[in-house]
Image: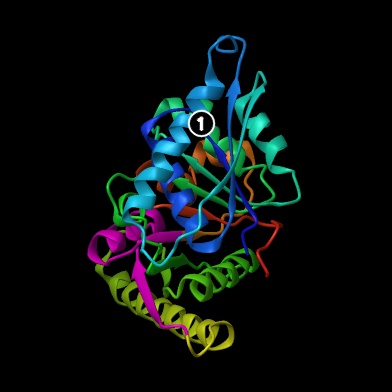
Amino acid sequence: MFRTILLPIDFSEPSARAARFAAAIAYHTGSKIRAFTVETQQTENANHFGLLKQFVFDAADTIKKTIHPAIKQDLEFEFETMTHDLVSQAILEAAEVEEIDLVAMGTHGRSGLSALLLGSVTEQVIHELQKPLVAVNGGDHPVLSDAQLPHNILVAINFTDVSLAGLRQAVKLAELWQSRLLLFHSVEIAVTVPYTPLNTGPILAAESDLIEQANNSLSDLARNEIPHDIEFELIVTEGEPSNKILETIEERVVDLVVVSPRRQKLIERILLGSTTERLLHHCPVPVWVHQEGQYSLTN
């Protein structure tokens, strides 16, 4: 499934976590890692090539010391420095190589006005990338510190075609990693009515109906899409999706979140934000992003 994992490095702690997660995947799947860093006009005279190799070797060595002793193979690496004025564009160009199946990169979790006006490199890449990306922001979760592959994968479902494609990717990951799936949907109820107790009954009834419909739809989706040998659980909540996902991560042992955002216009992102971008800022576990019209892992 994974031939080569593209690993952009900016020498930050999130970047180190992404390197460890990429190394864990590569050790378990026999993938190659292509690590690179981008030199801008301000940094192109630095000795980044040697630093890049040491940075990635340190991450791989950390993982190798904790990985299962039955896995003996050494990792295959490629190292490269690129010169480009725009870091995000350099990553997108590097990801166009056919054998790249996954991009793994750290995200700094910036939030507030700076994120709205500028965005992060990870977010800029996500909106243009045609291949899956796993973004790492969390701290000492076992999938980042102990070379563990994800055991519980939460899949955010909103019943669109793109989230169905994301579920199918999650099924492939569950088959590869022998993981358990948590199919997650949060019902958002926004009703504007005159302030009167007479409206309370119908709103509560509608809420109950929506939750029941979501449960039934998730059940149908699981029956049609999940093989019998994959363990799964259905989770339906009520509220803003990203907040509810973060609550579920705290309540359950979740190791990876799979989200499938639709492509948004810039004004929509500024005014409304998105579930994916909120998760990039706050999620303590890796976030696998599968976008609309994106390349799929099928082998």
The structure residue drawn at horizontal position 28% and vertical position 64%, both measured from the top left corner, is 196
Residue toward you, 20 or 247 = 20
Image quarter (top left, top right, bottom left or bottom right) of the C terminus: bottom right
Question: Three-letter amino acid code at disc 1?
Answer: Lys
Q: Secondary structure at mark 1?
A: helix
Image quarter for residue 289?
Answer: bottom right
Name the residue at 43% across, 59% down.
257
Q: Position of residue 108 (x, y in %)?
A: 41, 34
Q: Say if the magenta span includes residue 9.
A: no
Asked whether the viewer can see residue 186, the reply is: no
**Left or right for 284, reference 80:** left
> Is 111 located above or below residue 17 in the figure?
above
295 over 204 or under it: above or below: above
Between residues 194 and 45, which one lies in front from this camera angle? 45
Residue 3 screen position, x and y as percent: 65, 56
Label 1 CA crowd tier, 10 Å (few <14, some 14–19, many 20+):
some
Which residues, given as a range, are shown in magenta? 230-257
Image quarter where the N terminus lies is bottom right
| Residue shown at the point (45%, 78%) measured from the top left | 214
Q: Which residue is identified by label 1?
A: 53
Horizontally, is 297 left or right of 171 in the view? right
